[in-house]
Image (tube, coloured by chain):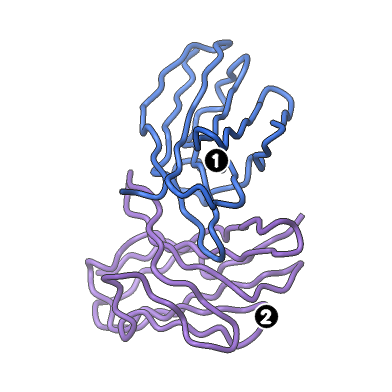
Amino acid sequence: RKEVEQDPGPFNVPEGATVAFNCTYSNSASQSFFWYRQDCRKEPKLLMSVYSSGNEDGRFTAQLNRASQYISLLIRDSKLSDSATYLCVVTLGNQFYFGTGTSLTVIP
Amino acid sequence: GAVVSQHPSRVICKSGTSVKIECRSLDFQATTMFWYRQFPKQSLMLMATSNEGSKATYEQGVEKDKFLINHASLTLSTLTVTSAHPEDSSFYICSARDSSVGNIQYFGAGTRLSVL
């Protein structure tokens, strides 16, 4: 079983739509959680950390549900520039586990 | 914010040559750095974990004699692809963990290797 499972998509949504991604993790002892964004042929860049209390940064909201062992990312009012692959990352000790990424395309 | 510098960004070489890629943490000390490989339209694959002052830990299926890793200082790790072959052509990305800010991992810009 993979440490992190993520729906690869693709998600094709119209501009202005709200879209949500989920990511499940298998080890309840996992410690830190992040969402990264990766543009085509570029390196992943940190989008936001994820906390149990939830955190919001503009149009982006991240949530952690430890009981059900999943993290989520909500994007409101999608922009064309949001088109990218979104990776969830879970840490356990010194190990980082990446999801396979969810592809998002925002359509005009 | 923290910055990780990776060099070179692009390498084209002949089969059989060795290629060295450098990864530097510019704003913080990184006892642990990671090396990934990514093929087109595929997810990141961890190759090895580079530990300052000790031997790297390689993932299953990654040849340690083929991919030499050196982490001689707290700000520099290098990956050398020895005797590169066309099947080694890929996008290699390093990252460094900043343990002072909650274990966030910052990535270098990647090195695109093409072996002819």
Q: Alpha-carbon distance for marks 1 and 2?
A: 26 Å
**Residue name at image x 55 percent, y 66 percent:** A94
Residue kind at label 2, given as amino acid type: Leu
- Crowd around label 1: few <14 · some 14–19 · many ≥20 (10 Å): many
Q: Which residue does the numbered mark 1 point to in the structure image? A: A37
Percent x, y of residue A8: 36, 34
Quarter of the figure with residue B107: bottom right
Percent x, y of residue B116: 24, 69
Q: Are marks 1 and 2 in contact (CB under 8 Å)?
A: no
Query: Taking B108 as reference, is A48 above or below it?
Result: above
Q: Nearer the viewer, residue A89 or A43?
A: A89
**Circles 1 and 2 on the same subunit:** no
Residue kind at label 1, given as amino acid type: Arg
Quarter of the figure with residue B30: bottom right
Write down which chain is painted purple: B
**Residue name at image x 42 percent, y 81 percent:** B80
Badge 2: chain ID? B
**Residue name at image x 48 percent, y 72 percent:** B49
Percent x, y of residue A75: 59, 22
Q: Which residue does the numbered mark 2 point to in the structure image? A: B74
Percent x, y of residue B4: 64, 64
Query: Taking B45 as reference, is A73 above or below it?
Result: above
- Crowd around label 2: few <14 · some 14–19 · many ≥20 (10 Å): some
Quarter of the figure with residue B48: bottom left
For label 2, the SS is: loop
Q: Nearer the viewer, residue B35 or A15?
A: B35
Query: What color does chain A have in the rendering?
Result: blue
Query: Taking A2 as reference, is A104 above or below it?
Result: above
